[in-house]
Amino acid sequence: MANEPTLKELLDTMIRALVDIPEEVKISEITGEQTTVFELVVAKEDLGKVIGKQGKTAKALRTILTGASTKLRKRSVLEIIE
């Protein structure tokens, strides 16, 4: 099980592929007893790309995160900070 990518690395890879300014991507991980919260900060110009039309991209990112979390028997939440 060693060397498996973490949920944070998974999110980081997906989000950097979406944005124009990948060096501005910052993900902080807040681990609680039952839930891990990932706070995402991107450049203002990239906010629309991460959220998508009617929030579809953000919803897709959250769906992938939930699926990966379930496999690890954890609960994760993605918050996009404006």
Image (spheres, helix red, strand yellow):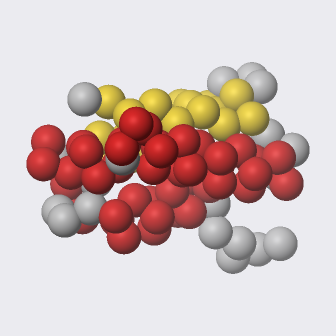
The front one of 25 and 32 is 25
The front one of 50 and 4 is 50
- Residue at 21% x, 51% y: name it: 46
- Residue at 51% x, 56% y: name it: 11
On the image, the x and y values in percent for residue 7 come to 62, 55
> Can residue 39 be seen in the rendering of this structure?
no
Location of the N terminus (image quadrant): bottom right
On the image, the x and y values in percent for residue 73 come to 87, 44
Quadrant of the image occupied by residue 12:
bottom left
Horizontal placement of 32 versus 24: left or right?
right
Q: Give the vertical position of 69 relative to 80 (above or below).
A: below
Horizontal placement of 12 versus 24: left or right?
right
Location of the C terminus (image quadrant): top left
Q: Give the vertical position of 18 relative to 67 (above or below).
A: below
- Residue at 40% x, 59% y: name it: 15
On the image, the x and y values in percent for residue 4 come to 71, 72
On the image, the x and y values in percent for residue 18 come to 34, 64
Seen from this angle, which residue lies furthest left?
45
> Can residue 69 be seen in the rendering of this structure?
yes
Q: Give the vertical position of 75 relative to 20 (above or below).
A: above
Seen from this angle, which residue lies furthest top?
33
Horizontal placement of 14 versus 75: left or right?
left
Seen from this angle, which residue lies furthest front?
54
Quadrant of the image occupied by residue 53:
top left
Horizontal placement of 18 versus 8: left or right?
left
- Residue at 29% x, 52% y: name it: 49
